[in-house]
Image: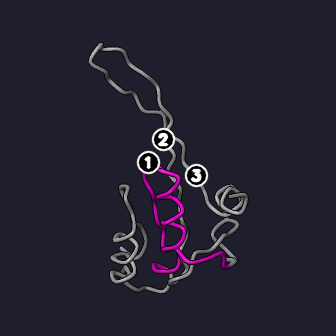
């Protein structure tokens, strides 16, 4: 469990958004949404500084499985090398990741 917490804290980028929830009593409740952002370089998940010098940190499919267990609200995946290398999105990899994700999934890069 400590490894998972360390992994989530130190190896991913998070976006925290506030959402308004309307209940049957018409009371608005503020709720934080946790949205991890995974950076891909080809098929590897990487940690970067200003999107440069990516350091391999793991397999994106395993990361998605961890985030399923943590019940995150959404996940964003950015292929930071696709545009630079002038290649289209890796549809097979996206399909594999999406088959494991039980949350909304956003993809960017090479579009």
Q: Is residue 2 magenta?
A: no
Asked where in the image residue 101 lies, by quadrant, the reply is bottom left
Marks 1, 3: nearer the viewer: 1
Which stretch did the figure color magenta?
56-83
2 and 1 marks in contact (CB < 8 Å)? yes
The chosen color scheme is: one colour
Residue that extends furthest to the front in the rendered view of this protein: 1
- Separation of residues labelled 2 and 3 (CA atoms): 10 Å
| Rendered residue at 48%/66% (across/down) | 64
Query: Given the current orientation, which residue lies at the most extreme left position?
Result: 24
Residue 107 horizontal/vertical position (percent) = 39, 66
Q: What element carries label 2?
A: strand
**Residue 3 x, y percent position in the rendering:** 71, 63
Cα separation, mark 2 vs mark 1, equals: 6 Å
N-terminal-most mark, 1 or 3: 3
**Disc assigned to residue 64:** none
What kind of element bears circle 3? strand
Q: Where is residue 68 in the image (x, y as percent from the top left)?
A: 46, 58
Q: Mark 3 points at which residue?
A: 14
* Residue 73 at x, y percent in the picture: 44, 48
Q: How far apart are marks 1 and 3 (CA)?
A: 11 Å
Please tell me how crowded label 2 is: few (under 14), some (14-19), or many (20+) other residues with Cα within 10 Å. some
Question: Disc number at residue 33?
Answer: 2
Name the residue beneath numbered marker 1.
73
Residue drawn at the location 36% of the way across and 14% of the way down: 27
């Amino acid at each position: 469990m400590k490894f998972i917490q360390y992994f989530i804290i130190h190896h991913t980028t998070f976006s925290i958004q506030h959402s308004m929830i309307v209940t049957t009593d018409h009371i608005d409740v503020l709720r934080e949404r946790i949205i991890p952002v995974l950076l891909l370089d080809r098929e590897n998940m990487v940690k970067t500084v200003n999107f440069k010098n990516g350091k391999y940190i793991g397999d994106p499919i395993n990361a998605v499985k961890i985030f399923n267990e943590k019940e995150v609200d959404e996940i964003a995946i950015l292929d930071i090398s696709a545009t630079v290398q002038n290649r289209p999105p890796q549809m097979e990899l996206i399909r594999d990741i999406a088959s494991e994700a039980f949350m909304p999934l956003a993809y960017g890069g090479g579009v």
